[in-house]
Image: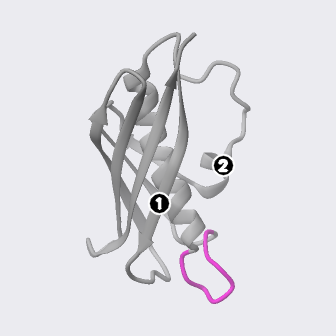
Amino acid sequence: MYPGAPEVTVIDKLGIELTEISARRTTGTMPVEGNTQPAGLLHGGSSAVLAETLASVAAQVHAGEGHQAVGIELNATHHRAVRSGTVTGVATAIHLGRTTASYEIVVTDDRGKRVCTARLTCMILGS
């Protein structure tokens, strides 16, 4: 999907696993362990990376061959703390246009409780 991409990316470093990939819906998981801040809680930046990863992959599928999707705006609201387990993210398309794609990303904990709600808009670049 990403010709010329480095062998190791932030996806690998944070332990993100993609579980479903499409332009309309992309899902994945990430361990809490190793992605915490000093107080032992899931780092908000880690949730943001998960959210941006899922939506960016979905946007890249939407963009198609010969085009590239790049994030241009990300916002995230953190709802609750998580100390252990795995979080799951679901990126759902809000808008799939010719030049932009926007997604809502919901991150939940092992109990299905919402941890974070994010939104990402990507610009679609031509070849």
Residue 94 in percent (x, y) is at 27, 42
Residue 75's tag is: 1
Residue 34 in percent (x, y) is at 64, 70
Residue 53 in percent (x, y) is at 51, 46
- At label 2, counting other C-alpha atoms closer than 10 Å, the crowd grade (few under 14, some 14-19, many 20 or more) is few
Provide the major secondary structure of the magenta segment: loop
Judge left or right: residue 80 versus residue 84.
left
Residue 126's tag is: none
Q: Quadrant of the C terminus?
A: top right
Judge left or right: residue 84 versus residue 4.
left
SS of the residue under disc 1: strand
* Mark 2, residue position: 10
Q: Which is nearer the eye, 49 or 13?
A: 49
Which residue does the image show at 52% across and 52% down from the upper left?
Answer: 16
Viewer-side label of 2, 1: 1
Q: Quadrant of residue 93?
A: top left
SS of the residue under disc 2: helix
Position of residue 122 relative to residue 85, above or below, is above
Spatial distance from mark 2 to mark 1, Cα to Cα?
19 Å
- The single residue placed furthest to the bottom in the displayed view is 39
In the image, the segment drawn in magenta is 35-42
Q: Amino acid at mark 1?
A: Asn
Which residue does the image show at 60% across and 85% down from the upper left?
Answer: 40
Position of residue 78 relative to residue 101, above or below, is below
Q: Quadrant of residue 36?
A: bottom right
Q: Quadrant of residue 49?
A: bottom right
